[in-house]
Image: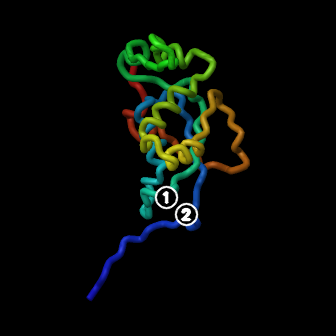
Amino acid sequence: MLKSTTASLKPAEVEKKWIHIDAEGVVVGRLATFIANRLRGKHRGDYTPHVDCGDYVVVTNVDKVVFTGKKNTDKIYYRHTGHPGGVKSTTPEKVLGGRFPERVLEKAVERMLPKESPLARKQMTHLRLFAGAAHTHEAQSPETIDFKSASAKNTRSV
């Protein structure tokens, strides 16, 4: 009689890779989905939901990501200061043109990971975002993934 068991990864058995993605001209939502799957480890055949088996992801040119349609001006991000009447709002256009343009992609990826869990917080620490073309992780020799040419929908058609 054959018995089949599901193989479950143990944290000590996980081998993490470093990948690099150039985000210039790439649609935010599609890139965030790809990054979230890589951070969780869902691209692996031995994916285990309760183990951090994802890769390290380095993204450059985050300030040059694009939105489809009129989301750049019409989409609104809300936050609350914690005081009565303290609802603040901003648009992706203002955030990308501001001091911290990487927050647009960071929040998009964060919202695609499991909510409010220690595992999701740990996986978010494996995401490195850089506004320019240079990054500080050359020593890890990350594998470059050409996300832009993987699908025609990954870039915005003008």
Q: Amino acid at mark 1?
A: Val
**Total numbered labels placed on residues in the image:** 2
In the image, farthest residue toward the top: 85
Q: Secondary structure at mark 2?
A: helix
Residue drawn at (41%, 16%) of the image? 76
In the image, farthest residue toward the left: 1
Q: Secondary structure at mark 1?
A: loop
**Horizontal and vertical percent position of residue 146:** 51, 42
Q: On the picture, is 64 further left or further right than 149?
A: right
For residue 87, which quarter of the picture? top left
**Which mark is on residue 51?**
1
Residue placed under numbered mark 2 in the picture: 11
Residue drawn at (52%, 32%) of the image? 106
Q: Amino acid at mark 2?
A: Pro
Residue 31 shows in this picture: no
Q: On the picture, is 56 further left or further right than 91?
A: right
Mark 1–mark 2 CB contact (< 8 Å): yes
What scheme was used to colour the molecule?
rainbow
